């Protein structure tokens, strides 16, 4: 259709949502599907968070809010960033958005102009390149390796840079690999960004879900210079099991924060009013829920790693964060979409093809499900691998 803009024509649909929807459609038809493709916690939002939102509705807090969010929530986020991340942001530097996805997109729109390049390590979260394209920018993909734990090295960063480089995206802990950058690794990347004034978009949505000896570090906390170059993105979906609430936020130097707020003013106006009161309760309430959730995921992570290591024709790196395994499947001789189609249609196991993340010789499996589903799904996956 000629009336569709060229900007949209460049954008690919989300394969992660496509796989999830296909699995849901099969389940709706009565088929038994072992869904290992999901990107959201299987547990419900804690009751005290839901109660706060219900109370806000009952009290009539259902009108427009300031574009960047209710003052109480921005103040609470300022306190959270200081306590958890050693980051000092005034409430005016924080913008509450309709999900961390929108926070990322607002940040990209605020910085990127037509023809600007954005460096994105692969495997990447599916939406980063498409957001860059929508903003008129050019994604520059840097292929990471198992040998470096799926993390971009300083040498790779330098090789990918050009005079057109305007931004680099760092996602730690990462989706789909679960990779967690150390403070030393972040500092090495940050020093390169500083040399050319390259803005850093630091997506930290999985910060609470780290395991073993791994520690989450916010790159903006490592120096004042890095703070002045970084837009920190986070949200409530993963840690508080609030995926459908659509609440994220950016924290940035004042000039960038003002630009992001301006975008918000002219797009969604504000994040949902009563959902913001739920988020406020999430920050101010008992945080034991998060530790319980993290502990459950760690058990599943270790169980899944032991199972996957025993399969001879795949390779896997132990993830240190998030709730995914990114599995190298190149030895099977199947491209990722074909592999996932066969796995779903014949073995009733839903996985996400690696091509969605810019890496066609791998697939993503998620362990944010019940242990029973995980166990049976892995049994079927093992059978699939033996037969291919």
Image (tube, helix red, strand yellow):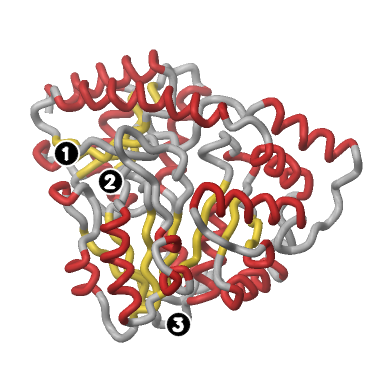
Report crowding for label 3: few under 14, some 14 to 19, many 20 or more residues within 10 A (C-alpha): few
As drawn, 377 above or below 356:
above
- The residue at 76%/30% (across/down) is 51
- The residue at 52%/37% (across/down) is 239
Q: CA distance from mark 2 to mark 1?
A: 9 Å
- Which image quadrant for residue 95? bottom right
- Which image quadrant for residue 385? top left
Q: Quadrant of the C terminus?
A: top left
Disc 2 + disc 1, Cβ < 8 Å? yes
Q: CA distance from mark 3 to mark 1?
A: 37 Å
Left of 229 or right of it: where is 339? left
Residue holding disc 2 = 354
Pick whichever, 358 or 68, lies toward us: 68
Q: Is residue 325 visible?
A: yes
Which x, y percent locates residue 207?
45, 45
Per the image, label 3 sits on a secondary structure element best described as loop
Residue holding disc 1 = 329
Residue holding disc 3 = 114
Left of 140 or right of it: where is 82? right
Choose the circle earlier in sequence order: 2 or 1: 1
As drawn, 82 above or below 352:
below
Name the residue furthest bottom. 163
């Amino acid at each position: 259709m000629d009336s569709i803009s060229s900007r949209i024509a460049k954008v690919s649909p989300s394969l992660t949502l496509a796989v999830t929807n296909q699995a849901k459609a099969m389940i709706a038809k009565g088929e038994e599907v072992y869904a290992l493709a999901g990107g959201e916690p299987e547990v419900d939002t804690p009751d005290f968070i839901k109660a706060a939102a219900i109370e806000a509705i009952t009290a009539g807090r259902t009108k427009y809010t300031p574009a960047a969010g209710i003052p109480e929530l921005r103040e609470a986020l300022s306190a959270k960033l200081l306590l958890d991340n050693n980051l000092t942001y005034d409430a005016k530097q924080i913008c509450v958005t309709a999900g961390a996805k929108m926070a990322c997109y607002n940040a990209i729109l605020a910085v990127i102009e037509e023809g600007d390049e954005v460096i994105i390590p692969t495997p990447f979260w599916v939406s980063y390149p498409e957001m860059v394209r929508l903003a008129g920018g050019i994604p520059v993909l840097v292929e990471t390796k198992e040998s470096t734990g799926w993390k971009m090295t300083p040498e790779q960063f330098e090789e990918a840079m050009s005079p057109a480089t305007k931004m680099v995206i760092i996602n730690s802990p990462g989706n789909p690999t679960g990779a967690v950058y150390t403070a030393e690794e972040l500092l090495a990347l940050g020093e390169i960004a500083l040399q050319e004034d390259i803005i850093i978009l630091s997506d930290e949505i999985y910060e609470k879900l780290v395991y073993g000896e791994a520690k989450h570090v916010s790159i903006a906390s490592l120096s004042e210079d890095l703070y002045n170059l970084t837009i920190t993105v986070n949200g409530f979906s993963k840690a508080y099991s609030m995926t459908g609430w659509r609440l994220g936020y950016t924290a940035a130097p004042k000039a960038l924060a003002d630009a992001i707020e301006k975008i918000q003013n002219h797009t969604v106006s504000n994040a949902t009013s009563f959902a913001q009161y739920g988020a406020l309760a999430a920050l101010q309430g008992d945080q034991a829920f998060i530790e319980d959730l993290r502990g459950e995921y760690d058990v599943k992570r270790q169980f899944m790693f032991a199972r996957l290591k025993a399969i001879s024709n795949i390779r896997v790196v132990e993830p240190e964060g998030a709730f995914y395994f990114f599995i190298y499947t190149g030895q099977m001789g199947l491209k990722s979409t074909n592999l996932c189609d066969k796995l779903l249609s014949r073995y009733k196991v839903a996985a996400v093809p690696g091509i969605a993340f810019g890496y066609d010789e791998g697939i993503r499996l998620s362990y944010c499900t019940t242990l029973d589903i995980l166990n049976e799904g892995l049994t079927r996956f093992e059978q699939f691998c033996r037969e291919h």
